Amino acid sequence: QVQLVESGGGLVQAGGSLRLSCAASGRIFSSYAMGWFRQAPGKEREFVAAISWTGGSTYHADSVKGRFTISRDKAKNTVYLQMNSLKPEDTAVYYCAASAVSGCKGPAIKPDLWGQGTQVTVST
């Protein structure tokens, strides 16, 4: 069974840090880009970051640039989102996604597979 499983969410104070992980299991695609999205209550899901299959190309949304960093470990089939200097407006459910297109398309990434999501709550 092909699936993406996120972990690492939780409650943190403003200014703190969290690292999200997304582990892919099963045979997904021969090569795939990965991305992180988030959805806050009452808002649409929005793009956060993406990374190419090789890891050599990344893209971060302006709202998180300089604070969040996406990375991946191909040997572990895992993608990470390091989140620093967290703000209350970062509170959301964070989803990882896999795309059968191997290049980093930034916000144009078209996910073919989604994880179940992990809650991140940033308190004031």
Image (cartoon, helix red, strand yellow):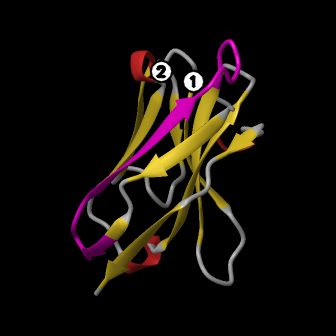
Name the secondary structure under disc 2: loop
Residue 64 picture quarter = bottom left
Q: Amino acid at mark 1?
A: Ser
Q: Amino acid at mark 2?
A: Gly
- CA neighbours of label 2 inside 10 A, class few (<14), some (14 to 19), many (20+): some
Q: Which mark identifies residue 55?
A: 2
Residue 82 location (% of width, % of height): 33, 47
Residue 78 location (% of width, % of height): 45, 31
Residue 14 covered by magenta stretch = yes
The single residue placed furthest to the bottom in the displayed view is: 124
Name the secondary structure under disc 1: loop
Left or right, 73 with respect to 108, comes to left
Q: Label 2 near label 1: C-beta < 8 Å?
A: yes
Instruction: Please tell me whether residue 96 is drawn above or below residue 33 in the rendered image.
Output: below
Residue 59 covered by magenta stretch = no
| Viewer-proximal residue among 114 and 17 | 114
- CA neighbours of label 1 inside 10 A, class few (<14), some (14 to 19), many (20+): many
Q: Residue at x 75, y 24 (%)?
A: 100
| Viewer-proximal residue among 48 and 114 | 114
Left or right, 49 with respect to 29, comes to left
Left or right, 97 with respect to 74, comes to right
Instruction: Please tell me whether residue 22 is drawn above or below residue 122 in the rendered image.
Output: above
Instruction: Please tell me whether residue 90 is drawn above or below residue 36 in the rendered image.
Output: below
| Viewer-proximal residue among 102 and 112 | 112
Please state the extent of the stretch shown in magenta in the rendering. 11-32
Q: Quadrant of the N terminus?
A: top right
Q: CA distance from mark 1 to mark 2?
A: 5 Å
Q: Residue at x 68, y 84 (%)?
A: 42
Q: Which mark identifies residue 66?
A: none
Q: Residue at x 68, y 32 (%)?
A: 2
Residue 80 picture quarter = top left
Q: Which mark identifies residue 52?
A: 1
